[in-house]
């Protein structure tokens, strides 16, 4: 069976419209292409969207940069350990390694596919500094339990909310309640700035350090840059990186944030549509969710491990793109020696998981094509 390129249904598809094109033109017209007024506006709008008035936010160049800076802010360095779910994005592992610390790989909960907090507790040692709690696809980590564990051992919590912008947890918006919380705005995330990220911190001191670290360590009055101007002089007191967000990226982000609620409703509706059909397919396990409180980034099913590769081929032949999120950390050469607990659930899930196409405003006809393709694989 061959499917024309234009009939191929992608797993991810950013939604960009006239507003984004206008925003880019305006930002280019202003002519201050680096970090400036649009970044200030994006940070303010993001803070409002996540209802984090009592927190501080800095936009950065990528989600990976946000993770790296968060770990440095937490004082993580050589000799330290950071506990992360083994089932996580490569960016998290790389951010830990970049600080000189060692990733410690933890198993996940079989239902949420987020960190198993009891398993994490068993991995804490005097070298542990941070525990990473990542929200996966359409589920949230058990943030109350993670916070209790961290408090009991004096650890910092880094909440990876790359999948959960717009979600609500125990009545509070994701981003508004964590110790350190990061977002990503790469091309496939809930909203995009093309490339971008953000870190939410609790104190003005942390914000000041973060602002310097994203800009080569340069300490300066933020009002100057946020006013599209260069300071006359500045001091450098600490390690820094070229991790700031630029005006053009931020302008796209402002336009995208306007549509967050619209994107959210559409993503929820598609996931509910998938669940309604696929829950009845024997051998397919669907997310145990009504999607009311989350904004799903991925729609993942689980299928018998021995059938997954042939299902992938079957879907591809029918023009249905699909993906695996993720190959777990301990299967990468770089992390072969990393300390870990038992990874029984991770290993099982890694062989069963499959991401189906999910993007805002996906036509109903596409949803039908995806579900028909899955159903036809498992029989009439
Ligand atoms: C995308 C993603 C990241 C990394 O963000 P980038 O902006 O791509 O660097 C980190 N964690 C998770 C869970 C992600 O999905």
Image (spheres, grey):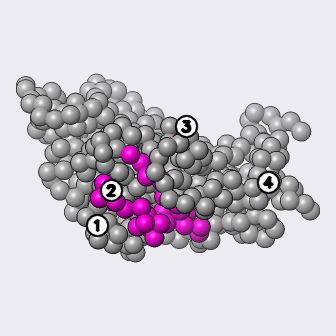
Q: CA distance from mark 4 to mark 3?
A: 24 Å
Q: Quick one: label 3, few (<14), some, or many (20+) residues within 10 Å?
A: few
What residue does disc 4 label? 306
Asked if 315 appears above or below 347 in the picture, the reply is above
Q: Earlier in the sequence, mark 3 or mark 2?
A: 2
Mark sitting earlier along the chain (4/3) = 4
Q: Position of residue 119 (x, y in %)?
A: 47, 66
Residue with the mark numbered 3: 333
Q: Which residue is mark 2?
A: 128
Other residues around mark 1 within 10 Å, as few (<14) / some (14–19) / many (≥20): some
Tag 1 residue? 153
Q: Closer to the N terminus: mark 3 or mark 1?
A: 1
Magenta-tinted stretch = 102-127
* Magenta highlight on residue 119: yes
Q: Position of residue 162 (x, y in %)?
A: 45, 51
Earlier-in-chain disc, 1 versus 2? 2
Q: Are marks 1 and 2 in contact (CB under 8 Å)?
A: yes
Residue 162 visible in image = no
Where is residue 165? Give x, y as percent. Answer: 43, 56
């Amino acid at each position: 069976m061959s499917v024309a390129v234009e009939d191929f249904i992608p797993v991810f598809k950013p939604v960009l419209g006239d507003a984004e094109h206008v925003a880019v033109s305006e930002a280019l017209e202003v002519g201050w292409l680096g970090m400036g007024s649009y970044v200030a506006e994006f940070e303010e709008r993001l803070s409002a969207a996540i209802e984090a008035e009592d927190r501080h936010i800095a936009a950065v160049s990528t989600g990976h940069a946000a993770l790296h800076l968060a770990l440095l802010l937490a004082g993580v360095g050589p000799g330290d350990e950071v506990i992360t779910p083994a089932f996580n994005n490569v960016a998290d592992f790389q951010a830990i390694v970049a600080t000189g610390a060692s990733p410690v790989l933890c198993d996940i909960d079989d239902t949420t596919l987020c960190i198993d907090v009891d398993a994490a507790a068993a991995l804490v040692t005097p070298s542990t500094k941070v525990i990473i709690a990542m929200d996966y696809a359409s589920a949230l980590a058990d943030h109350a339990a993670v916070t209790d564990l961290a408090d009991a051992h004096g650890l910092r919590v880094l909440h990876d909310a790359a999948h959960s912008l717009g979600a609500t947890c125990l009545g509070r918006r994701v981003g508004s309640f964590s110790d350190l919380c990061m977002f990503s705005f790469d091309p496939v995330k809930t909203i995009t700035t093309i490339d971008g990220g953000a870190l939410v911190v609790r104190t003005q001191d942390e914000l000041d350090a973060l602002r310097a670290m994203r800009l080569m360590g340069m300490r300066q009055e933020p009002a100057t840059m946020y006013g599209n101007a260069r300071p006359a002089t500045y001091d450098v007191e600490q390690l820094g990186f070229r991790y700031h967000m630029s005006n053009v990226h931020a302008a796209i982000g402002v336009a995208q944030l306007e549509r967050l609620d619209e994107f959210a409703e559409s993503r929820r509706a598609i996931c509910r549509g998938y669940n309604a059909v696929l829950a009845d397919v024997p051998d397919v396990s669907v997310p145990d969710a009504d999607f009311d409180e989350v904004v799903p980034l991925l729609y993942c099913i689980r299928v018998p491990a021995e059938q997954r590769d042939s299902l992938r081929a079957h879907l591809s032949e029918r023009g249905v793109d699909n993906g695996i999120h993720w190959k777990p950390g301990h299967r990468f050469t770089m992390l072969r020696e990393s300390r870990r607990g038992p990874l029984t659930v991770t290993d099982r899930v890694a062989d069963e998981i499959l991401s189906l196409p999910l993007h805002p405003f996906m036509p109903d006809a596409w949803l039908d094509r995806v579900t028909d393709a899955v159903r036809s694989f498992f029989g009439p």
